[in-house]
Image (cartoon, grey):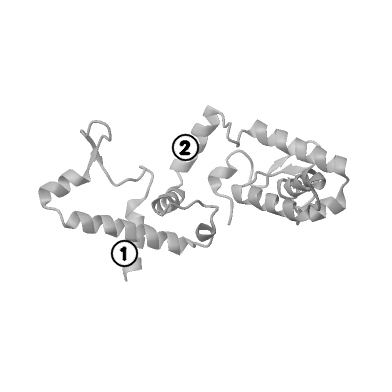
């Protein structure tokens, strides 16, 4: 699974090069979970867990030279405990400065939201996952292809159209009219549940291809 474009907003695609020569990379939630699992498998006892956790973090978040470390075990073989701890601390400080954690600054959050609004495919994937109450880190979500997302989204759209077809013209017009969720008054927008950047013409064409 590749890192979504909006998660790369804070840095160049190759990562953020440090004055000391290393490249620091952002971690996805999946990579963080993989680092934790590897650290638990590497640590022979509780006393070694912190060192193993730092090594697994460095393997995924720090690149020295042209290639990243293949694993936390490789980091343990290449560096001493103090150097591993130093790299891990420097990466953590960089990650906090970049503001991609739970304490995301308001300005950064707005930038991420604006970036997402211009990525209709990401929004389509989110709508499918939300409908089926799935997280992107779950195995069933990671196994889905682009065609799977399109197939699900097209069928959800067809379900909505079939429900509208059962209504009389007056009720259909009412159902399609956007309504304020608080007072119920018309908003003047079509209630299709999509952001303005979504290319419905292209999506409808793709949906029709799945029906043939």
Task: Give the side of residue 87 with respect to residue 188, left or right.
Answer: right
At mark 2, the secondary structure is helix
Question: Could you tell me which residue is drawn at 13 percent across and 47 percent down?
Answer: 171
Contact? badges 2 and 1 (CB < 8 Å):
no
Q: Which mark is residue 208?
A: 1
Task: Give the side of residue 60 with respect to residue 156, left or right.
Answer: right
| 162 to 61, vertically: above or below | below
At mark 1, the secondary structure is helix
Task: Give the side of residue 82 with respect to residue 124, left or right.
Answer: right
The quarter of the displayed image where residue 100 is located: top right
Nearer the observer, 208 or 52: 52
Nearer the observer, 105 or 34: 34
| 54 to 129, vertically: above or below | above
- Residue 143 on image: x %, y %: 53, 62
Q: Is residue 18 visible?
A: no
Sequence order check, earlier mark of 2 and 1: 2
- Residue 34 on image: x %, y %: 66, 53
Nearer the observer, 81 or 125: 81
Identify the residue under disc 2: 114
Q: Is residue 36 visible?
A: yes
Question: Could you tell me which residue is drawn at 74 percent across and 43 percent down?
Answer: 23
Quarter of the image with the N terminus in it: bottom right
Task: Give the side of residue 147 with respect to residue 59, left or right.
Answer: left
Q: How many marks?
A: 2
Nearer the observer, 11 or 193: 193
Q: Residues within 10 Å of mark 1 (few under 14, many from 20)?
A: few
In the image, farthest residue toward the top: 106
Question: Could you tell me which residue is drawn at 41 percent across and 51 percent down?
Answer: 124
- Residue 111 on image: x %, y %: 51, 34
What's the distance in space between the residues labelled 2 and 1, CA to CA?
30 Å
Q: Residues within 10 Å of mark 2 (few under 14, many from 20)?
A: few
- Residue 212 on image: x %, y %: 32, 71
């Amino acid at each position: 699974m590749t890192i979504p474009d909006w998660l790369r907003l804070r840095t160049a695609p190759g990562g953020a090069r440090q004055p000391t020569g290393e490249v620091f990379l952002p971690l996805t939630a999946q990579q963080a979970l993989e680092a934790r699992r590897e650290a638990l498998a590497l640590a022979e006892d509780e006393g070694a867990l912190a060192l193993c956790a730092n090594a697994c973090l460095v393997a995924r978040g720090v690149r020295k030279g042209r290639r990243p470390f293949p694993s936390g075990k490789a980091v343990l073989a290449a560096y001493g405990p103090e150097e591993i701890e130093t790299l891990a601390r420097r990466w953590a400080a960089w990650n906090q400065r970049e503001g991609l954690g739970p304490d995301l600054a308001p300005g950064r959050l707005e930038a991420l939201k604006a970036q997402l609004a211009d990525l209709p495919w990401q929004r389509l994937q989110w709508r499918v996952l939300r409908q089926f109450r799935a997280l992107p880190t779950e195995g069933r979500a990671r196994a889905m292809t682009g065609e799977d997302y399109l197939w699900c989204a097209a069928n959800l759209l067809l379900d909505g159209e079939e429900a509208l077809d059962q209504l009389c013209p007056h009720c259909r017009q009412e159902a399609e009219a956007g309504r304020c969720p608080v007072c119920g008054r018309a908003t003047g927008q079509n209630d299709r549940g999509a952001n303005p950047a979504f290319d419905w013409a292209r999506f409808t064409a793709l949906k029709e291809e799945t029906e043939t």
